Each structure stands twice: as C-alpha cells, then as structure tokens.
Amino acid sequence: MKCLILAAGYATRLYPLTENFPKPLLKVGEKTILDWLLDDIHTSGLVDQYIVISNHKFAHHFQAWADDHKLPITVLDDGTESNETRLGAVKDIQFAIEELKLDDDLLVIAGDNVLDFSLVDYIRYSKEKNTTCIMRYFEPNTEKLHKTGVAEVDENDKIISMEEKPAHPKSNWCTPPFYVYKKEDVRLVKVGIESGCGVDAPGSFIAWLCTQTPVHAYEMPGKRYDIGNLASYEEVQRNYKGIVK
C-alpha cells in the first residue's frame, strides 16, 4: 500500500503563518502535523511508500522535511503557484498516479488534520471489507453539514449516496478526507474526472465512485482536529494530546 498525502493547498485562512510556509509542517506540540499522521500510519507495517503532493511554492519545504526522515517519502510538485491556479485535490491525486505509475492500494489523506485515534484499525477495516473505504462521524450541526462531504450509509456500512457540501443534507454522517482506494479503483480516478466528477474536494471522486462500485464507511472511534484557520490552530495547540491508546 502507498500513502498519498494531499498537501498542495495554500491555506490562505491561516495567513500570515502559511503565507510562505505549508500548513502540514506547522507544529502541534512537539511534532509537525504530518509527523503525527505518518508516525501512526507507519506502525501498521502496511505502507511501503509515502507520497506528498505539493504545490510549487512549498515543494522545497516538504523536500527538506522529507530529507530529514528515514521513512520512504517522495515529494511531488504539481507545478501550481497560487490558490487561483491550483489543480484541485482529485486532479492532484491523478497527477500522482500518472507521475509515479501507481498501481497499488492507496491510502489518501489530507495533510492538515490530526486525530486522537490511530488510523491502523481503519486500514485493517478496509482490508476486511475489501472495498474502497472512507471515514465518517456523526455531525449534529446542520450548518457544518453544508460545508463538508455527507454520506448516506446502510446497516452494513455501505454508502448509499454521498454529496460534497449539500444544500439539503441527507444524513448527519460527515466524511473527513481520509480514504483507502482499492487498487482497482485507483485506476478509475481518471474515469471519474472524465465523467465530470468534481475535482476540488477529494470526496467528489468518492461521491462518483460509490455509484459505480461498493464503498464502505468506517465510523471514527475518536476525534478529528481540522486546522482550517488561526482560531482552530490555536485550539489544537491547547487541546491536542496525541493518540489516545
């Protein structure tokens, strides 16, 4: 399995912290956001390569970070230089697939979240289901549902439907940007783009894919800290204690 980290955004809502520095490399406690994620994932023993997809503006920061690690990390520069010219998450995923000729199961994660639970059980869950899988958590706040991916799920965790930023949410199941693509479905990313799926939010591909093949949704056993603006970053700095064993 390969792990693809989506890190090509410009984090304009975190200026001035991220005006000249990538959000995933900000420190939370004693480690960067990325190190919290990768240190956990690597304990699974199932990932043999980590791929960070960056924009051109920040690629050198990620390369310097990667050079300081023993993990097998590849940094890809998608060539974009501004928020206005960014490819969008789904096109970045396809860019990485084409550049590295990826043909393996793929763990796709956003590089700007930290979790208080391990991703290892989620990876194992995907192996048991033997399908592409997403994560989900119950969100009672309707206003928040308008700003995220929302999935309908049956009694066996199978996705019935999924929509990004719905005007009229069909459920309270939010879908944060952590996905396991089966190898066979990695080959369908290009098809999804060509079929007109959205490309900005990574969940847009899943919303299309679940109409083509079974996709299951793992219920998160803990909390996700989404670092979207200065206030949320300050909150994480105050409250995040690492993974709860």
Image (cartoon, grey):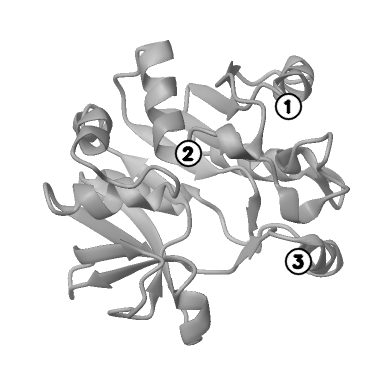
- Camera-side residue of 111 and 155: 111
Whether residues under marks 1 and 2 lie with C-beta atoms below 8 angstroms apart, the answer is no
First in sequence: mark 3 or mark 1? Answer: 1
Residue at the disc numbered 2: 88
Query: Badge 2: how crowded within 10 Å, few (<14), some, or many (20+)?
Result: some
Q: Amino acid at mark 1?
A: Phe
x and y percentages locating residue 77 in the rendered image: 60, 18
Determine whether the residue tagged by mark 3 lies in a helix, strand or loop: helix
Quarter of the image for residue 136 reads: bottom left
- Camera-side residue of 19 and 47: 19
Query: Can you tell which mark lies on residue 232?
Result: 3
x and y percentages locating residue 103 in the rendered image: 29, 19
Determine whether the residue tagged by mark 1 lies in a helix, strand or loop: loop
Query: Badge 3: how crowded within 10 Å, few (<14), some, or many (20+)?
Result: some
How far separated are the C-alphas under marks 2 and 3?
23 Å
x and y percentages locating residue 87 in the rendered image: 49, 32
Is residue 46 in view? no
How far separated are the C-alphas under marks 3 and 1?
22 Å
Point 35% across, 18% down: residue: 102
Whether residues under marks 3 and 1 lie with C-beta atoms below 8 angstroms apart, the answer is no
Point 27% across, 63% down: residue: 162
Query: Can you tell which mark lies on residue 116?
Result: none
Please give left or right for residue 106 compared with residue 142 in the image.
left
